[in-house]
Image (cartoon, coloured by chain):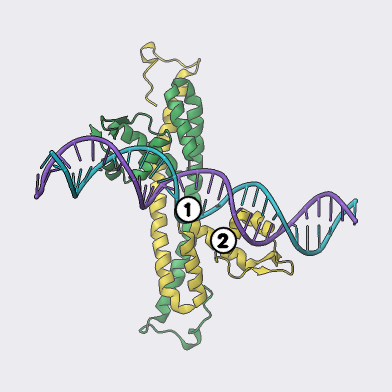
Chain colours: A green, B yellow, C cyan, D purple
Amino acid sequence: MTYTIHEVAQKTGISTYSIRYYHDHGMLPFVQRDANNNRVFSDSDLEWLNMIVCLRATGMPVERIRHYIDLVQEGESTVPERYEMMKVQQERTLEEINQLQEHLSTINFKVDHYAGLLDSHEPDSFVPSNLRQTPVNN
Amino acid sequence: MTYTIHEVAQKTGISTYSIRYYHDHGMLPFVQRDANNNRVFSDSDLEWLNMIVCLRATGMPVERIRHYIDLVQEGESTVPERYEMMKVQQERTLEEINQLQEHLSTINFKVDHYAGLLDSHEPDSFVPSNLRQTPVNN
DNA sequence: GTTTAGCGTTAGACTAACTCTAAGTAATAG
DNA sequence: CTATTACTTAGAGTTAGTCTAACGCTAAAC
């Protein structure tokens, strides 16, 4: 089964711009061309693309991904380096998730804060008069 | 208590470049200048900076953050919009964490895969001869 | 049989959010 | 009094796209 660039974009949710960008930067070395010079994607190219998306989304720079893909093509002797790369990425991603969770709780706090403010200004809600007009920080 | 830009960079882990960038783009409207035109940061500026970092790290564009900070300065009447902004950010961050967790399991899989490969090539490990030299995909 | 619509191509301009460099000022140290 | 240090600004450079313009090929419409 083969796909046009637009079909790939549809299937993966990645823009055609990005797909061309990845291809042009050596991250999709197996993509073929048809008689009309159009890119032809196979299922295995889609899998590669998914891997690229995974690595990008977890913060690996394009240049590193390119290097990783080069390593894969060089064969089994590069497994140790690939292993190290993936362990680094694993660590980085765990760290990133932790940070996001911390940021999320900051945001949760803000949401609750604003919800409280809005609630206390609902016309129907009762607020003791000595609590109205409290200074709102932010 | 006040701080120089380098002290702030140290305290927060944000580069002086970024701090100036945020200030220049209206996201730190309360930062003062000393007689020598150098930026002077207060503890409350540090808190603002932390909020900026939180919003940036969870994917809010600089322009939106600026807008948020403008809203805060406009006073209580903008609480509903700020509430909506924070709820959007909350939702987006939850989504982002979920995606990262999915990507992490892809990476975990790779790590295990490579660990297995390395293990089976350890000189001391026993591998039945009919299992050696299996084709390594990637 | 031409023309026009549709999908693809490339080269290159544009953008966001930094990141860095260069050139300048002002206080401080020797 | 000069040298170093800490800051300033303007503007160039970088990354990872994103978009536009100009063009090619094919297929359907007139």
Quarter of the image for the N terminus of chain A: give it.
top left
| For residue B37, side relative to residue C7 (left or right) | right
Work out whether residue B106 can be spotted.
no
Query: Which chain does tag 2 point to?
Result: B
Front residue (pair B85, A67): A67
Residue A123, position as x, y percentages in the image: 37, 84
Residue A56, position as x, y percentages in the image: 44, 42
Kind of residue at disc 2: Tyr
Front residue (pair A105, B5): B5
Circle 2 is placed at which residue position? B22
Front residue (pair C9, A115): C9
Query: Which numbered disc covers residue A100?
Result: 1
Name which residue lies at 41% across and 76% down: A118
| Above or below: residue A19 compared with residue B10 | above
Front residue (pair B77, B123): B77
Residue A90, position as x, y percentages in the image: 48, 39
Name which residue lies at 47% across and 48% down: A97
| Above or below: residue B27 compared with residue A27 | below
Q: Can you tell which of label 2 and label 1 is closer to the viewer? A: 2
